[in-house]
Image (cartoon, helix red, strand yellow):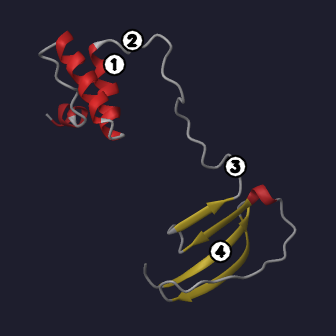
Amino acid sequence: MQAINDKLEVFDGDKLIWSKQLVLKPLETFADTIRADVKLNQVRVKLGGNKLEYSANPDSDVLGRPLESPKDFDWNSVYGLYLQGKEDIRQRYYAAAKEKLEACLRKDPNFLPPCPIWPCLSTAI
């Protein structure tokens, strides 16, 4: 929630087709109409350079990461049980999380989860 004093730009692909300086107070709305002969999926809108960017192309924000876990991953391994417990905690399924984490530690009482910053530390040392 802040005032806006930035340029709103509308593009057809990479070609700028409309621009307007916006000076708005917090919660003040803005509406305008643009008449243009463009393909809808090529329309892009930017506010303030990079403060807000929108693309009508449905493929513009598709991430290239896997949507399914590997078929050969063993969810009953120490690490698999740990991951399930960690996810259950994140979703606030605490009883299920406790069960999975205890099963993990029964398999390996010395299990230490991987440190998320370890790759950064190992390259800095």
* Residue type highlighted by circle 2: Asp
Q: 23 above or below 98? A: below
CB of mark 1 within 8 Å of CB of mark 2? yes
Identify which residue is drawn at 27% across, 35% down: 94
Residue 58: assigned label: 3
Dot 3: what SS? loop
Residue 80 % position (x, y): 33, 18
Work out how far the residue at label 2 is from the one at label 4, CA to CA, in angstroms.
Answer: 50 Å
CB of mark 3 within 8 Å of CB of mark 2? no
Residue 41 % position (x, y): 76, 55
Q: Which residue is mark 2?
A: 74
User: Which of pointers 2 and 4 lies earlier in the amino acid sequence?
Assistant: 4
Asked whether, in this view, residue 4 is left or right of residue 30, the answer is left
CB of mark 2 within 8 Å of CB of mark 4? no
Identify which residue is drawn at 33% across, 36% down: 93
* Residue type highlighted by circle 1: Gly
Work out how far the residue at label 4 is from the one at label 1, CA to CA, in angstroms.
Answer: 48 Å
Q: Nearer the viewer, residue 95 or 42?
A: 95
Q: Nearer the viewer, residue 56 or 93?
A: 93
Work out how far the residue at label 3 is from the one at label 2, CA to CA, in angstroms.
Answer: 35 Å
Q: Check the picture and name the quadrant holding the N terminus.
A: bottom left
Residue 85 % position (x, y): 30, 28
Residue 98 % position (x, y): 23, 28
Is label 2 or label 4 in front?
2
CB of mark 4 within 8 Å of CB of mark 3? no
Identify which residue is drawn at 77% across, 80% down: 33
Q: Tell me which corner region of the image, top left, top right, bottom left or bottom right, holds residue 19.
A: bottom right
Asked whether, in this view, residue 60 is left or right of residue 86, the answer is right
Is label 1 or label 3 in front?
1
User: Which of pointers 4 and 1 lies earlier in the amino acid sequence?
Assistant: 4
Q: 7 above or below 122? A: below
Crowd band around label 2 with a 10 angstrom C-alpha radius: few (<14), some (14–19), many (20+)? few
